[in-house]
Structures are given as C-alpha cells and as structure tokens.
C-alpha cells in the first residue's frame, strides 16, 4: 500500500540527487561522465500517472559551456616611474591625467621630464656618436614629432642630423639648444601613459631610484582570478562579454592567462612541505582586452562581471539541469509530460551550460515538456 505523499517526496529526492550530481560534474563546463549511485527503488516510488510539480520545455538551439566570473575594470601595464636625477620636485602630473608623446610627466628644479615612446629605458645621456636601440627610439620620436623628417629611424647612430633634430626639439620647448638629451630629460614608455597616482609630493627631494609616479597604459582592461583547476575554461583569444558598471556590456577577448603558482597542483592534497595554507585553492590571473576600448566606461577598479563563452554546441536539444532524474536502473532520465500524462525516458547527457544540459535519446523533440521541481 502506498503511503500518502511518498510519490512526490521520492521524486523530489531523485531530482535533488540528480541535480546535485550534475551540478558538481558540470562546474568545470564541457563534457562529463556521470556515475549514478542512487539506491535502487521500487515501482512504488513513482507512479506513471503522477504529474510532476512543474514542467519546462525541451529546447533546440545553441548551448554554451561558458562561466560567469567577477573581475575588476582597470588599466593595462602598471609600472612605477623613478626619478632620473637629484633635485626638488616642482611639478607632478595629476592622478588620472593622460600623457602622450612629448607631454610632461613631472619637473625637477623646473626642468620637465617628457614622455617618449619606446621599450628600452632611458639609462644614459644621448649625444653625437652614441649607438644603440635607445638612439633608434629617440630618432623615431623626433621624426614623429616633426623635428627629424630626414632621419633614418632604423640607424642606431646619433648622427649630425640627430643633433640638428634635437636642437629643433629643444628650441620648441624654449630650453638651451645643446643637441644632447640628458638622462633626466625624457622617460621612455610603450605608449601613452595614464597617471595612476603620485608617489611623491611637490617640494620633495627627488633622486635616482626614488619613485615619483605610478603609471599605467591608457587602454582599459579587466582582470579576474580563477581556480587553477578551472583555468582550462579561459584560453587566450577566447571571446568574452563584460557587464560594465552602471549598465551596458562590451565585448572583448582574453589577452593573457597566468600560470598557476609552482606546486599548486599539490595544494589541498595534504602533501608534505607543510607551512599551512594547504587548504587554499591556487589561483591564476586572467586579463581581458576590449574589442572597442571606447565602450569600456567606468571608474578605475570598478567591479564587473565577465561571461566566458567557452565551447558552443550548435543546434542541440537541451533541458534544464533540474529536470534530470537519477534512474533506478542507473543513468539519468527525464519525465515527459504529454496530454495530462507522464512517462519516464532515459537520456544521454552532453555539454552543460547556462543552467541547461544537452540531451539525446528518449525520443525527445523541440517543444516537449519535461518535469521539473516546483520553483
């Protein structure tokens, strides 16, 4: 004899067990193999005539295994700029200021330090006869500014033509025309710079190695962290969608995926070498660049959500994850609801994503209704 309420209760238990198993298996995205260990039940547990608490449609369409993670909107390539020579700081660019080629970064004893573009640092004074990559960089900048139209930027020699170009540059800034560039006259960086913050104040004594400014690039980026075990879900070049502060979204791509810390594969495994903290999950940092940087609006260090596209399966049938039942004979199935009746069918599971799971078998078609727990 059936006990009142046992049918619905056991069905909910089956849904709960199946849902938990599936969610645990699906957290990393992609394809999964599930093992059903739900105890065998008698036919008393569910009746073919008992309707489920609610129903949801089987859907045909594209399914993505993407994840959503929380990140921070910021700026690229943060670096610290140190003073090149001694003196008193008499002017510093404001926090948030964008500085382009030939723009002032700071002044020492009233003498400006100007930004030029290049990968090599300004590590020496430059004068006639000098050779090197830093000389090439200087010549490229003078040419870009219109002071060295006849210079060969691929020639790494400080020529007489370079001397003339430097004097033109110095004359434009109303300083002594020496034809030489002092180490404290310019600072090289990869491109336009944004002042993140000042590391010193006007009136402070500057000196070699003493920080003056923290700079970043002007490009907006997003950074977020993932458990090292989930890092395969983020690959360089993958497309993402960023939900921005104040509403709106912007598309972008994963630009970098950091390497897990050394030994992280053993963290949490109880290995030797103690020191505590073994229960902490290793993290990797992921960087995102925007397809259209102008769309990436919001204050620095604003929280954002990043939707990782992951793998996409085209034109597949899927059901809500909580529609799955752990079958008494093993595996998983769903309850098909048709014309006021219900029947249980076994299905094979594919990819998980967006709260749904790809299913095949059981005679399922687009638009069919399957049982789900009452929300």
Image (cartoon, rainbow, N blue to C red):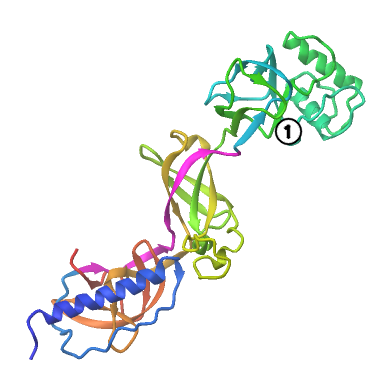
Expressed as whole percent of the image width and height from the top left, the position of residue 56 reads 23, 67
Residues 52 and 336: in front is: 52
Residues 207 and 21: in front is: 207
Seen at 69% across and 20% down, the residue is: 113
Is 347 above or below relative to 42?
above
Q: The residue tagged with tag 1: helix, strand or loop?
A: loop
Name of the residue lying farthest toward the front? 275
Left or right, 163 with respect to 68, comes to right
Quarter of the image containing the C terminus? bottom left
Residue behind mark 1? 118
Seen at 33% across and 87% down, the residue is: 330
Quarter of image, res 372: bottom left
Quarter of image, res 40: bottom left
Neighbor class of circle 1 (other Cα within 10 Å; few <14, some 14-19, many 20+) is some
Task: Please name the predominant secondary structure of the magenta segment in the image.
Answer: strand
Q: Does the magenta stretch include residue 273?
A: no
Seen at 59% across and 58% down, the residue is: 261
Residue 301 visible at all: yes
Left or right, 219 with respect to 373, comes to right
Expressed as whole percent of the image width and height from the top left, the position of residue 356 reads 34, 66
Question: Which span of residues is magenta-colored?
Answer: 55-77
Residues 202 and 291: in front is: 202
Expressed as whole percent of the image width and height from the top left, the position of residue 121 reads 75, 33
Q: Is residue 63 magenta?
A: yes
Residues 292 and 104: in front is: 104
Seen at 76% across and 29% down, the residue is: 122
Quarter of the image containing the N terminus? bottom left
């Amino acid at each position: 004899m059936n006990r009142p309420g046992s049918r619905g209760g056991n069905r909910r238990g089956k849904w709960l067990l199946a849902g938990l198993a599936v969610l645990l298996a699906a957290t990393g995205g992609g394809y999964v193999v599930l093992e059903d260990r739900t105890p065998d039940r008698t036919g008393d547990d569910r009746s073919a005539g008992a309707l489920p608490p609610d129903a949801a449609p089987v859907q045909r369409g594209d399914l993505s295994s993407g994840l959503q993670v929380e990140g921070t909107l910021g700026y690229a390539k943060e670096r610290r700029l140190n003073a090149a020579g001694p003196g008193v700081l008499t002017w510093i660019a404001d926090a948030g200021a964008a500085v382009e080629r030939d723009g002032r970064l700071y002044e020492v004893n009233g003498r400006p330090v100007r930004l030029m573009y290049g990968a090599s640092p300004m590590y020496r004074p430059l004068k006639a006869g000098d050779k090197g990559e830093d000389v090439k960089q200087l010549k490229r900048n003078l040419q870009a500014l219109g002071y060295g139209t006849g210079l060969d930027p691929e020639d790494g020699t400080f020529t007489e033509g370079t001397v003339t170009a430097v004097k033109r540059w110095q004359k434009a800034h109303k300083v002594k025309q020496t034809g030489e560039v002092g180490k404290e006259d310019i600072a090289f960086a990869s491109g336009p710079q944004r002042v993140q913050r000042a590391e010193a104040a006007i009136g402070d004594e500057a000196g070699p190695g003493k920080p003056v400014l923290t700079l970043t690039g002007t490009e907006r980026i997003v950074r977020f962290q993932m458990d090292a075990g989930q890092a395969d879900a983020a690959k360089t070049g993958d497309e993402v969608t960023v939900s921005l502060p104040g509403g709106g979204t912007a598309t972008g791509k994963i630009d970098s995926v950091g390497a897990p810390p050394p030994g992280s594969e053993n963290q949490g495994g109880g290995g030797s070498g103690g020191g505590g903290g073994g229960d902490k999950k290793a993290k990797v940092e992921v960087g995102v660049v925007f397809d259209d940087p102008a769309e990436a609006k919001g204050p620095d260090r604003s929280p954002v959500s990043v939707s990782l596209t992951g793998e996409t399966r085209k034109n597949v049938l899927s059901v809500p994850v909580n529609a799955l039942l752990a079958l008494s004979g093993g595996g998983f199935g769903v309850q098909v609801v048709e014309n006021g009746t219900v029947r249980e069918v076994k299905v094979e599971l594919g990819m998980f994503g967006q709260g749904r799971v790809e299913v095949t078998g059981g005679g399922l078609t687009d638009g069919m209704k399957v049982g789900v727990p009452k929300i």
